[in-house]
Amino acid sequence: MEKPLTAHIPKDGSWLRLKDYERVGGYQGLRQALKMTPKEVIDMVKDAGLRGRGGAGFATGLKWSLVPTPDQIPGPHYLIANGDEMEPGTFKDRLLLEGNPHQLIEGMIIGAYAIQAEFSYVFLRWGYQFAEKALEEAIHEAYEAGYLGKNILGSGFSHELSVHISAGRYICGEETALINALEGKRANPRAKPPFPVVSGFFGRPTVVNNIETLSNVPHILSKGVSWYKSLSKCEDGGTKLYGVSGKVKRPGLWELPLGTSFREILEEHAGGMRDGYQFKGALPGGGSTDFITAEHLDVAMDYNSVAKVGSRMGTGTIIVLDDKTCVVGMVLNLEHFFAQESCGWCTPCREGLPWTEKLLLALENGEGKMEDLKIFDDLTRYMGPGNTFCALAPGAMEPLQSALKHFRADFERHIHEHRCPWK
Amino acid sequence: MDTQTQRILTDDMIAEIRDMYQHFPVKKAACIEALKLIQKHHRWVSDQAVQELAEVLDMSPDEIDSVATFYNLIFRKPVGRHVILICDSVSCWIMGYEKIADYLKQKLGIQFGETTPDGRFTLIPICCLGTCDRAPAMFIDEDLHRDLTVEQIDAILERYP
Ligand SMILES: Cc1cc2nc3c(=O)[nH]c(=O)nc-3n(C[C@H](O)[C@H](O)[C@H](O)COP(=O)(O)O)c2cc1C
Ligand code: SF4
Ligand code: FES
C-alpha cells in the first residue's frame, strides 16, 4: 500500500530536509509543472480527482480554474495554505507540517504557478512551534536552491512565500475570515459572493487550500493521473490521513486509501475499543460533523459514501463516543466550544449558540424539560445552512441534530431521571 | 524612572513593525503581528501599549483593541510567569481533562482565568491543541504536555519555578 504523503517522514521526529526530499523524488512535480502551461496543470489536477481535504471536499482543480487569469484581472494573485487546524478532534495537518514541509511548499509553488500567483502564505495556527520552525527552515532551503524567488529553475516564473502565525481563534480557519486575519483585522467572515477566487486578499484573486490538499499536488504532477486515481478505493483520487481519538486502544493517525472503511480504521488501525468500553457512535470528521452509529460501521470513509449515511467526511479525523461517556455531555462540550468561538457577526449564531449551550447545560444537570427537545429541533433548523454568513453555525448543529436523531432516548433519560445517568 | 512616561514600544520594536507593514498596501495589516511582538517583549498588552501602537499604525486605540480582544492568544490582562493553557475540547473532555483541570485549580488555589497570588501561574482553558490522539493535553509556556494523568501534575509543575 502506497503512502506518498507520509512514507518519507523520518521516524525520529525530525523533518525531511531538502536533500533527502530530493532523493525521494522531491521537486520533480514542480519541474514537470513548469514544462506545462498553467491550464494544463489545472486540468491534470482536475482529472486526478483531488478534492479539498479542509472539510468541504471542493474539487481542487475546479477551484483553481475559477481564478481569473492575469489577462482577465491583472496581478497580484495570491495562494494561501490553510494550516489553522482548530476543528476540535483534528490533528492531521500537524504531521505533514512537522514532518514534510517541502512537500507542502512544492505543492504551493505548483498551485501558485497554476493560478499565476506571485505571493503565497502559510496561515499556521498558534501552538505548532515545531511546524513553524521546520517550515521556516524549509522555506529558506527552497530559496537557496532556487525553487522560490525570481525565475524559478529558469522558467521565468517568480514566487515569494511566507508564513503567518495566527493569534488564535477557530473562525480563522474559515477562508474569508482567514483572509481578514491575514490583513491584520478581526477575523469575521466576509459575505459571499464575491468568492475569494475573484476577490480575496486585499481584493485580489485568492485561492485558499488546506495543507493536506496542497501536499497531494506534487505527487499528481510527478507520477500522473492514473497512478493517483489508483491509490484510492473510490471515485475520487488519492490517499487520506485518517485519525482516531477517544477511548480506543491505539489513538493515532494513518495514511490510507481514500475510501477505506470506517470499520478497518477503527478496528485494525486504532486497535478497537479499550477493554471495558463499547462503541456507541462517532463524529467521522471532526467536531462539526453528524454522528454515525454502530449500524454505519461499514461505511467507506470517502466524501460521497459518508454523505449517504447522513454525515460528512469532514477532516477525516474520527472522534469516538463510547458507552460510558454521556452523549449529552459530549454535545454540551462541543456547543460550548462553538458558542465561545462564534465571531458574533450574525444573529442566529451569536444568540442561538449560547442558548443551545444553556439548554444543554440545564439538561445535563437534570433540569431539562421535554419542551427543550422541541426547542433543539427548532434551533438546528434556525442555524441550518443558508441562514448565516458562514458554515460555523450549521456545522455546530450537526452533532446536535444527529445526537437527537440517534440518541434521543439518552436525552429523555436526563429529563425523566432529573440527573445525568452517566455520572 | 516614572513608569507612566516610559515608552513600551522601543525604537527597535517600531522599526520591526515598520518592516512588517511595508509589504502590505496598508499599515493596519501589521496590527496582529505588532500585538504579538509587544506580547513577546512584555507578556501582555497594556492600554498604554495599545495607545502607542495606534500612533505607529495610524489607527484609533479602539480599533486596535477590537482586534486585540478578538484573538484568544493576545492577553489584555497581566499574566503570571508561566501560563498554563489546558485543552477543554471534545477529545480531551472524553479522556477526562476535567480531572486534570480540577486538580490544577485545587493545587494552585485559583479558578480559570486567574493568576496565583505569587504571580507564578495563570490558568486558562483553551480549545483543541491539535494533539487529540494524545489527550488530555496542555501547554505550559511553549511546552506541550500530553497523555496527562493527575499523578504527573506535581512533577510537571515543579519544572516551572
Ligand atoms: C468555522 C470554519 C473553520 C474552518 N477551519 C478550517 C481549517 O482549520 N483548515 C482548513 O483547511 N479549512 C477550514 N475550513 C474550511 C475553509 O473555509 C476552506 O473551505 C478550506 O480551507 C478550503 O481548502 P480545500 O478546498 O483544500 O479543502 C473551515 C471552515 C469553517 C466554516
Ligand atoms: S455563522 Fe457565526 S461564526 Fe459564522 S459569520 Fe455568523 S456569527 Fe460569525
Ligand atoms: S481536543 Fe484536546 S487536543 Fe484536540
Image: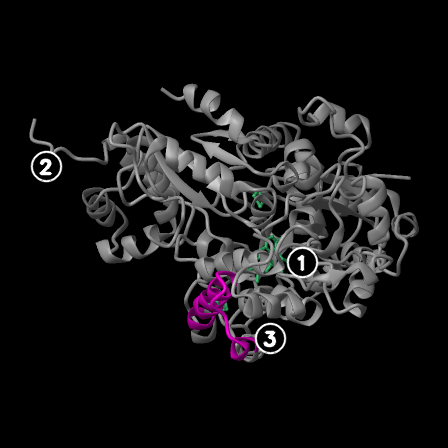
For numbered disc 1, what is the local secondary structure? loop
Q: Residue at x 72, y 45 (%)?
A: A244
Q: Residue at x 45, y 23 (%)?
A: B154
Mark 3 Cα-neighbour bin, 10 Å: few <14, some 14–19, many ≥20:
some
| Magenta-span inclusion, residue A367 | yes
Residue type of the residue flagged with mark 2: Gln
Q: Nearer the viewer, residue A6 or B152?
A: B152
Q: Residue tagged by mark 1?
A: A55
Q: Nearer the viewer, residue A119 or B137?
A: B137
Q: Whole-Å distance between the Cαs marked 2 and 1? A: 49 Å
Q: Earlier in the sequence, mark 1 or mark 3?
A: 1
Query: Quick check: B103 above or below A382?
Result: above
Magenta stretch in the rendered image: A350-373
Mark 2 Cα-neighbour bin, 10 Å: few <14, some 14–19, many ≥20:
few
Name the chain letter of the residue that bears numbered label 2: B
For numbered disc 2, what is the local secondary structure? loop
Q: Residue tagged by mark 3?
A: A385
Does any atom of ligand 2 lie closer than 8 Å to the CB of label 3? no
Does any atom of ligand 1 lie closer than 8 Å to the CB of label 1? yes
